[in-house]
Image (spheres, rainbow, N blue to C red):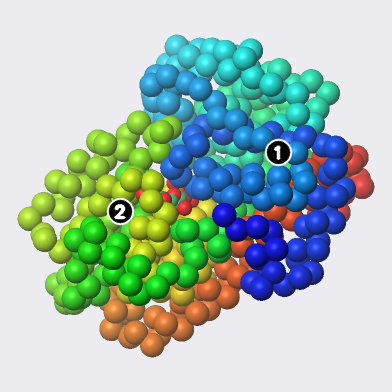
Amino acid sequence: MAKIDDYTPIVGQSTIDDLRLLAGKLAGKKVCHYNSTAVGGGVAEILNRMVPLLKELGVDTRWEVIKGGKKFYEITKKFHNALHGKREQLLKSDYEVFLETNRKNAAEANLSSDIMFVHDPQPIALVEKKGSNKWIWRCHIDVSNPDKEVWSFLSGFIKNYDAAVFSSQKFSQILPIRQFLIAPSIDPLSDKNKELSPEAINSVLDNYAVPRDKPIITQISRFDRLKDPVGVIEAYKLVKKYIDCRLVLAGGTATDDPEGLAVLSEVQERAAGDPDIHILMLPQDDIAVNALQRASSVVLQKSLKEGFGLTVAEALWKGKAVVASNVGGIPLQVTHKYSGMLCNTVEGAAFNIKQLLNHPQYAKKLGENGRNHILNNYLLTRHLKEYMLLFLSVFQSQDMVYL
Ligand code: UDP
């Protein structure tokens, strides 16, 4: 695992010096991250790297995961969908199970760290046990148009936090607490993003039986309807009428997502009969994700809603031409026709993919611009710096903060 000094050649000495300086100011403070899964999805991806690096910098940090049963995750998935604007039927008993699970966890957990940093809705009600310490709610999802009932239920907890953090300006809400805008990030030195040799890439593709005889279009995502995997297949089919290519649709499951298997079987049904569509159920294997992204001519992210879309940053960092939906946090990363292509429909996605496959020099240029954009804005070191500034700022009175 990379150490903090290993980032110096990428981001420069002054960035690393800033991190050490800020970490020094947090000496003696304890930080606890709380989320809903240790494996799968963007939040776990970030915490897996953020927590060890904060520790290495000397910030006393731990990471806890809320424990819940099948019913709890079914309910929180409904919350997730409703916050993304989908109509969901939530019963009184659903809210009760949600609260019971949070209260059971709260009774058993150590919630006394100086900073309790709670990610997303699943553990949000732990804040009922707030003492005189500082609590931050970190929202990773697109809540620009949430279902009113669910948002109002969650707001009852959010107002008891000291601050809320959103990934994009578009998601901020009217709240009685301070709000911060901090975008997610990727780790350029993790197995998922580090450089790979051509042999390593070929070996992964051989392993998954994906020939490299034609251009490859790839989307890597949990099998979730909001990632629109069926729309990905539709777009590929439109492209395939004109350009011979392969589609890789790869994803694993997250332990907090109960819908994955049902979506996977819908996708398999839609893909049936086309040997150039590769539906891959990936184990947790970062090198495989890395290699599949690197072997692709175009990386697609055709989400219907997206908090940020780490997969977009991962592909851009690899200099790939990206076609991604103009939703949520994606336009922070992709400026249309500069650092990738944005789309709004299946037809738009297909049109952009065709353009990129037909004009490899243009695709290369977009990929280069994209890599620079990620280097300047979305690497883990910037994220660490902003989190430490946030931690320091919650101990200051509001009018002293100039973040
Ligand atoms: N991911 C993975 N394996 C998979 C599917 C996704 O490692 O089979 C990773 C992906 O590379 C990214 C993260 O999970 O790092 C997903 O984050 P993103 O923000 O794109 O979406 P989320 O799943 O959080 O909605």
Quadrant for the N terminus in the image: bottom right
Q: Which element is circle 2 on? A: strand
Q: Position of residue 373 (x, y in %)?
A: 58, 72
Would you call the spot at circle 1 few (<14 residues within 10 Å), some (14-19), or many (20 or more)? some
Q: Secondary structure at mark 1?
A: strand
Of marks 1 and 2, the one in the foreground: 1
Q: Quadrant of residue 132?
A: top right
Q: Is residue 20 left or right of residue 270?
A: right
Amino acid at dot 2:
Ala
* Location of mark 2 (residue): 250
Which residue is nearer to you in this view: 233 or 89? 233
Q: Residue furthest left?
A: 273
Residue 315 to residue 60: above or below? below
The structure residue drawn at horizontal position 49% and vertical position 63%, both measured from the top left corner, is: 193
Q: Which residue is mark 1?
A: 61
Left or right: 236, with 178 as reference point: left
